[in-house]
């Protein structure tokens, strides 16, 4: 019988903030200073890139260049590597993509999806770990819950806290009922799964 090691878990919430409120504001400012786009979803043909589909996703995004916030990237990569070693145990993990700054306005949401691609011509690196960090104070919005795996399994994030999860786990952001939700989303990749 083959079993996973007892230490392995695929959803890990940080117990302490990875960013202070001041650092969260710096990241928000950096994200807002980059070109804003309507968020897209992967298209049906499996071609790299995506399409705007407001029935699946409504939010605004921008991409934070590595050189703009080098220290942030180094800090997050270090946290990811520790988290990977303690919980995931995936091979060859590195930071492979720039961070996505995301704003969910009132009514904004992102329906159920996974973060890795089933079309292997787009890999490697294979997305293995996803991270969402809440940048807004949790009192500034209602709704906008990050649900992982199934309805009601909510990552209860506070400002500056993050959740790391296996990129193959189904997840969604429920509609924002009041206010707006700002987050930092990142993906970490590695060699193909074996």
Image (spheres, rainbow, N blue to C red):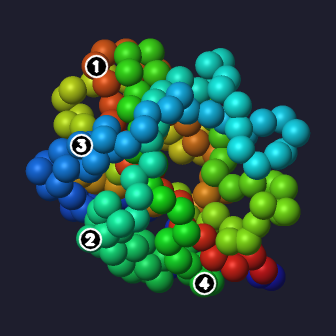
Instruction: Sort mark 1 into few (<14), some (14-19) or many (20+) by Cα contacts within 10 Å.
Output: some
- Of circles 3 and 1, the one toward us is 3
Q: Which residue is mark 2?
A: 71
Give the mark, 4 or 2, whose residue is nearer the N terminus. 2
Report helix, strand or loop for mark 3. helix
The residue lying at 78 percent from left, 61 percent from top is 122
Give the CA separation, mark 2 to mark 3: 15 Å
How many residues crowd mark 3 within 10 Å: few (<14), some (14–19), many (20+)? Answer: few
Question: Of marks 4 and 3, which one's residue comes earlier in the chain?
Answer: 3
Secondary element at tag 1:
strand
Q: Which mark is residue 92?
A: 4
Give the residue pinned by disc 3: 29
Marker disc for residue 179: 1
* Label 4 element class: loop
Are the residues at dot 3 and dot 1 in contact (C-beta closer than 8 Å)?
no
Ranked by sequence position, the earlier of labels 2 and 1 is 2
């Amino acid at each position: 019988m083959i079993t996973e090691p007892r230490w392995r878990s695929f959803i890990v919430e940080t117990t302490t903030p990875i960013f202070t409120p001041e650092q969260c504001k710096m990241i928000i400012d950096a994200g807002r200073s980059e070109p804003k786009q309507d968020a897209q979803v992967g298209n049906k043909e499996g071609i790299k890139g995506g399409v705007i589909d407001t029935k699946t996703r409504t939010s605004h995004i921008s991409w934070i260049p590595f050189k703009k916030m080098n220290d942030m990237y180094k800090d997050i990569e270090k946290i990811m590597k520790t988290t990977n070693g303690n919980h995931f145990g995936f091979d060859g993990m590195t930071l492979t993509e720039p961070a996505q700054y995301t704003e969910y306005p009132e009514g904004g949401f992102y329906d159920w999806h996974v973060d890795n691609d089933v079309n292997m011509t787009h890999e490697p690196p294979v997305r293995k770990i996803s991270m969402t960090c809440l940048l807004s104070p949790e009192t500034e919005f209602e709704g906008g819950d990050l649900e992982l795996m199934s309805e009601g399994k909510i990552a209860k994030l506070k400002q500056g806290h993050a959740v790391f999860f296996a990129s193959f786990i189904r997840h969604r952001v429920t509609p924002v009922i009041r206010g707006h939700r700002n987050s930092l989303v990142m993906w970490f990749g590695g060699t193909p799964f074996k």
